[in-house]
Image (cartoon, helix red, strand yellow):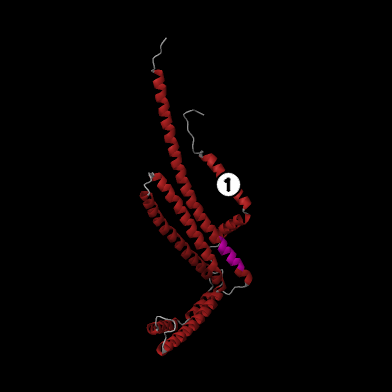
Amino acid sequence: MNRNQVQIVPDASTTGALIVRGVSAFARRNKGITFSYLFGILVLLLAGSGTKLTYDQQREYNRIMNSIDLEAEYLASNDYYSATQAYRATKGWLPWSCNDLCQRNKKRMDRAKNRLDAIRDEGYARMSDAKATAGLFSEVGVGEVKDSFWEYFQAGKQFAKRQSMWDAMFMGIRGIARGRDESMLEYALKVLIQVLLNFSLGLIMALFVFVFGLWSIVKSYQPDPLTAVLFFICAACAAFAFVMTYLLAIYGAAAGGVYGLAKMAEANLRLENGQQGGRRQRVQYNRPHYQ
């Protein structure tokens, strides 16, 4: 190698080989995670939007859903709200400072709550019967699970963006307050690492919340145990694969950007060393020789 040639960052082929060896070693050590990821990718590619409802299924589903008395639930909810406000208006600050009027309002509130709960339970039961008519693997079941996942996924991203904005601001304020002579590149790298951590935390937290609430969605379709377990595993693995692929894409983009900047810095350093070496050689050639 030339004396003036400087190599700080390995070339693309070496970096690619290191990544491949690292991924292979991780896959061999964590076979369960690898299988879950690959199975989830397969589910994402083959699942689609679920089986389409037949004409009879659609008609029965609509009939049961239309039988839910939404107006009764609305009236019961307003009654419960009014009773709650009346009870709070007559209730004192202390737990035992509830007079006769307060006690009557409390009983009225309890009756209104029981009536609202009964109406809602009946509505949920009818909705569950309608879902059972459609089926868990139907477009209705798959669509509901997708909507639930996207809701939590978007919430996780919003958390990461909001937290990253605050972290970037406070990191800049702390740097100024402590009087550190920090370059813009160092600050950008710190913010980048914090953004990656926030997205990892937000999306993994969203994944756990989604999987935790997934079983309640599965039970609402009244499936047999085998179908319920199969659908739960498929949905959980698909969600895990999507979140991990999204995070890997973010990590890859960030690593590629940092790698490109490092290669540019290496090229500039090599160019500067070459120019300094040329100047030293010219000085040596122009030095007078004495016999």
Is residue 48 shown above or below 264? below
- Residue 273 position within the rendered picture, expressed as x and y whole percent measured from the top left: 43, 30
Q: Tag 1: Cα neighbours inside 10 Å, few (<14), some, or many (≥20)?
A: few
As shown in the figure, which amino acid type bears the numbered disc 1?
Answer: Gly
Give the quarter of the figure containing the C terminus: top left
Task: Please count the marks in the image.
Answer: 1
Segment tinted magenta in the rendering: 229-237
Q: Which residue is mark 1?
A: 22
Of all residues shown, which one is farthest toward the top? 291
The reply to whether residue 20 is in sight is yes
Image-quadrant location for residue 137: bottom right
* Residue appearing at x 58%, y 66% in the figure: 232
* Residue appearing at x 58%, y 46% in the figure: 22
Is residue 128 shown above or below 28? below
- Residue 132 position within the rendered picture, expressed as x and y whole percent measured from the top left: 56, 75
Is residue 132 shown above or below 273? below
* Residue appearing at x 51%, y 65% in the figure: 209
Image-quadrant location for residue 108: bottom left
Q: Main secondary structure of the magenta part?
A: helix
Image-quadrant location for residue 265: top left
- Residue 2 position within the rendered picture, expressed as x and y whole percent measured from the top left: 49, 28
User: Does the magenta run of residues contain 209?
Assistant: no
Q: Going by the image, does 175 lie left or right of 207?
A: left
- Residue 109 position within the rendered picture, expressed as x and y whole percent measured from the top left: 44, 85
User: Does the magenta run of residues contain 230?
Assistant: yes
Is residue 124 shown above or below 191? below
Instruction: Classify mark 1: helix, strand or loop.
Output: helix
The foreground one among 164 and 251 is 164
The reply to whether residue 49 is in sight is no
Q: Going by the image, does 29 lie left or right of 210?
A: right
